[in-house]
Amino acid sequence: MKVLDILDKLGLELVSGKSGLDREITGGYVSDLLSDVMGNSKEGQVWVTLQTHKNVMAIASLKDLAAVILVNGFKPDDDMAKQSEEEGVPVLRTKERTYEIAGKLYELLK
Amino acid sequence: MHFEFDIEAGDFSKVGYASSQLKKIMKQLVGDHKIVKRVVVALYEAEVNVVAHAYSGKVIIDINTDKIEIKVNDKGPGIPDIQLAMQEGYSTASEQVREMGFGAGMGLANIKNNTDEFYIKSEVGVGTSLTIIANLITE
């Protein structure tokens, strides 16, 4: 499954990083602790978080994550969106809470 | 190959610059190797530590055919009890740093778990020096 597919199926809004929509998804990771994601996420996972600053993209890029989903209707800071464009790692957003969107993502990917 | 990067303390917008550069260099040298992923995690965490705790820092990278050696030296308050600092979950990070999702007390453990050799020296009131070594040849 590609990032473009979950965009459709989960009704997400694409904020930035359009060039990465064909990235392949291997799973998901849910955390707001950056060191946790740094230590435990795996390549190709979609990262669900409420963190909206630039360092999210540094980690997503270093770990080769497929995309970032921001919850609760949050928007990325300008420099986060900019880095998402530069790195080609999409930032998607949803109005839903972490619990709901993670559940739907899990159902979709299992 | 030898590279050096300066780290500006307190500026979180630049965290990850050295690790991102290292990733690009390593990908060209050895391709999509597991060791690249590991060593980049270790360096990122070391960068975060300098930005969050020290006054200034320097990253020195030496890449040889058999191993990569990274030194991260900072001028800063130092670590009074290294054993305690190495414990997962222990952190002295500020509230502001924690709100960003850093300061969970996992950084040094992440560094140790992602390298083959890890040495840390610290002097209170002077600074902290890390040496990170990853072997490029595993067999």
Image (tube, coloured by chain):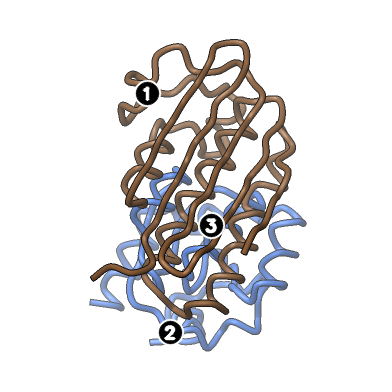
Q: Quadrant of residue A32?
A: top left
Q: Secondary structure at mark 2?
A: loop
The residue under the point 47% across, 64% down is A63
Q: What hue represents chain B?
A: brown
User: Residue at coordinates 44% horizontally, 80% vertically from top-left?
Assistant: A6
What chain does badge 3 belong to? Answer: A
Which amino acid, by three-letter code, is at mark 1? Tyr
Q: How many marks?
A: 3
Tell me if mark 2 has few (under 14), some (14-19) or many (20+) residues whose alpha carbon lies within 10 angstroms of its own.
some
The foreground one among A12 and A40 is A40
Question: Residue A92's quadrant in the figure?
Answer: bottom right
User: To which chain does the residue with label 2 belong?
Assistant: A
Give residue A59's mark.
Answer: 3
Apparent side of residue A91 relative to residue A36 in the rendered image (left or right) = right
- Looking at the image, residue B134 lies above or below residue B57: below
Q: In this picture, is A80 found above or below B89?
A: below
Tell me which residue sits at (70%, 41%) in the image: B7
Question: Would you place residue A87 above or below residue B57 in this image?
Answer: below
* Colour representing chain A: blue
Q: What subunit carries mark 1? A: B
Q: Is residue B129 visible?
A: yes
Of B59 and B51, which appears nearest the observer? Answer: B59
* Dot 2 and dot 3 residues touching (CB under 8 Å): no
> Would residue A107 be found to the left or right of residue A10 on screen?
left
Image disc number at residue A75: none
On the image, numbered disc 2 is attached to which residue? A24
Image quarter (top left, top right, bottom left or bottom right) of the N terminus of chain A: bottom left
**Residue at (50% x, 21% y) in the render:** B122
Judging by the rendered image, the residue that carries numbered circle 1 is B90
Q: CA distance from mark 2 to mark 1?
A: 36 Å
Q: Are marks 2 and 3 on the same chain?
A: yes
Residue A91, given in percent of the width and then of the height, sits at 59, 68
